[in-house]
């Protein structure tokens, strides 16, 4: 199995690589080679066995063709500019999120008949925007209200058309907001959902820019990597013409997140969360989905956490070696 | 009022130009200049007063910038490769229908703050694909099953994002299938819906490639031009974030079309329709919408015909000088 991963230097990419290398195979087929692309952040991944790294911009002429040349049978397309950045940097968002994806799809198509790789596309619940029902079902239409969501929705449409035409065997997975993101905050508008847990769990302050009543849809990084690998192996004949899926997750308010934090790490941890309302984030988040009935994905075997307490426990196990810094009592 | 019309050489473009020149104004604002673009077919339009014609490909470097340079306040973007051709010629469909639209939108955006033209985009009911409810309402999601429908759906998403960002004041109108198209058959897969009426009305044979039970959604060219002009003048604040609309029309089966033909032109006309099933058209049409509850558009003042008999009468008035060739009795 020859694999290509774009956006490999990102948080999900790195976790996916670790999981694939540990398993050594995908659906019982041994991994023979793995190519990784990203704009940067691949230097520590190069020494891994069977792995070729390409630090490159997929939009630049020839790059997509070059990474597709070896005919990877399985492509994980994770490369993206995140939501806040795509909103702030209009051109960059379209260039990376739309043109980059299209360059990759075109490179695949142009290799011609007989080449039709499995193409796993990391989409987002940001393809949906207000007005939305309280619980979104599998028939909800694409109504993005951000440039990021627009770009993801466009790529889903391309994925479906390229699959229908037989150029790729595509599957788009609308990842819930990932929490708790490890590492430093990124420029995603949704970043605070992780910050308000990760930082207090490490004994540090965090800023909450929205009201505690804000409800959103979550899965852990561990669950997200599980989704991505499952998408690589499931029988896409079951998808029919609708190639993109809402995934299971946990619906929780910010208040419920903080209650879970209190149960796991005490009052002191919650006291580290400072309220600093941010009108721009409040406006963006207001149009985002709150909960899903992801029946189709569950029937296809996708599995997520069942509570926010579980999401926090996953973070403590995977990122903190099982230990939490308990903050001082307020 | 400075106006730009793309795809001006097409059937709708020519009818729109005639209507605008006859009126001399749009929403009581005198038309001061009109630029027309198309790949060809503009030579007879050049001598019209106040009209500049540009025979050019919008995708070619600099063309979109050049036609936007004079800052048209009203843009009718009608240029498109039709459905059958977009399905047969994958690259051309994406180049014209997606890249051409994007080039235009980017040229507008790059003129910078202070320029935000009304942008009327001719979309299509092909943005919807099976499985569909018998009657489609205004909340139906984008689920195209053709490359043409995919390209139109992508452009609708761009239109919404560019409008939200304040680069254009966009409105997308999902035109019903236009019947009866005058002139020669084009490469639209839906062309037979017109051919089976237009040709017999002129005493000629026509081919019916699908079953008489096939139901579809129609408006006359006159109604379509009315939609386009209405879209140029209505208050887009009423659209909210959903910038594209299903339009009113007439839902009819092929059988009902032929009954209307019989009422207007007699049995002899119907006998000129030859059944030659075409599996490719049958497959495409099978995924197309059959009927709409276009309440939102009707509330916004869009008006269509109320029966297929009326659609035929419009054709006879507008194209045949009010007269029909009655075929011989079978």
Image (cartoon, coloured by chain):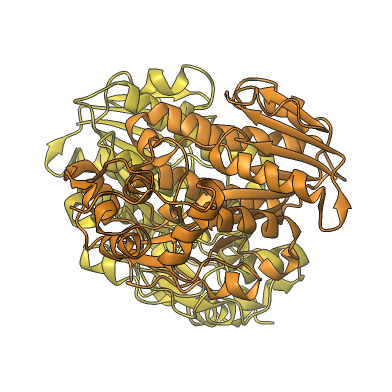
Chain colours: A orange, B yellow
Question: Toward which corner of the image does residue B227 lie, by quadrant?
Answer: bottom left
The residue sitting at 33% across, 61% down in the picture is: A257
The outermost residue toward the front is A328
Near-viewer residue (B237 or B291): B237
Left-right relation of A277 to B313? left
The residue sitting at 24% across, 48% down in the picture is: A273
**Residue A219 image position (x, y, % from top left):** 48, 59
Residue A135 drawn above or below residue B125: below
Near-viewer residue (A209 or A48): A48
- Residue A152 in sight in this render: yes
Quarter occupied by the C terminus of chain B? bottom right
Left-right relation of B318 to B288? left
Near-viewer residue (A219 or B191): A219
Residue A132 drawn above or below residue A159: below
Q: How many marks?
A: 0
Residue B14 drawn above or below residue A215: above
Near-viewer residue (B163 or A103): A103
Left-right relation of B288 to B36? right
**Residue B19 image position (x, y, % from top left):** 29, 45
**Residue A128 image position (x, y, % from top left):** 40, 58
Left-right relation of B33 to A40? left
**Residue B123 image position (x, y, % from top left):** 44, 52
Question: Toward which corner of the image does residue B66 lie, by quadrant?
Answer: top left
- Residue B181 in sight in this render: no
The residue sitting at 24% across, 32% down in the picture is: B116
The residue sitting at 49% across, 24% down in the picture is: B55
Residue A21 drawn above or below residue B242: above
Quarter occupied by the N terminus of chain B? top left
């Amino acid at each position: 199995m020859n694999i290509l991963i774009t956006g490999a230097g990102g948080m999900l990419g790195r976790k996916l690589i670790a999981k694939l290398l540990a398993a050594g195979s995908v659906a019982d087929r041994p991994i023979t080679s793995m190519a990784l692309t990203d704009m940067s952040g691949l230097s520590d991944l190069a020494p891994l066995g069977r792995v070729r790294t390409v630090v490159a911009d997929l939009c630049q002429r020839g790059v997509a063709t070059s990474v597709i040349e070896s005919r990877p049978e399985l492509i994980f397309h994770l490369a993206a500019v995140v939501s806040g950045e795509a909103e702030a940097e209009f051109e960059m968002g379209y260039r990376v999120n739309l043109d980059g994806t299209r360059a990759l799809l075109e490179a695949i198509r142009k290799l011609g008949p007989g080449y039709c790789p499995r193409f796993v596309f990391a989409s987002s619940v940001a393809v949906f925007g207000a007005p939305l029902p309280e619980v979104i079902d599998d028939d909800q239409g694409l109504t993005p209200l951000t440039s990021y969501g627009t770009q993801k929705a466009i790529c889903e449409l391309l994925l479906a058309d390229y699959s229908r035409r037989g150029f790729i065997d595509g599957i788009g997975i609308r990842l819930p907001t990932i929490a708790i993101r490890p590492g430093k905050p990124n420029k995603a508008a949704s970043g605070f959902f992780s910050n308000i847990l990760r930082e207090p769990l490490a004994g540090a302050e965090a800023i909450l820019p929205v009201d505690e009543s804000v409800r959103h849809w979550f899965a852990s990084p561990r669950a997200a990597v599980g989704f991505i690998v499952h998408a690589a192996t499931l029988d896409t004949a079951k998808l029919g013409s609708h190639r993109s899926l809402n995934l299971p997750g946990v619906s929780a308010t910010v208040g419920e997140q903080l209650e879970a934090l209190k149960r796991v790490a005490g009052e002191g941890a919650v006291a580290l969360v400072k309220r600093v309302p941010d009108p721009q984030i409040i406006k963006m988040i207001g149009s985002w989905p709150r909960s899903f009935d992801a029946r189709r994905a569950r029937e296809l075997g996708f599995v997520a956490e069942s509570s926010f307490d579980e999401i926090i426990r996953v973070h403590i196990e995977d990122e903190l070696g099982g230990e939490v810094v308990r903050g001082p009592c307020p």
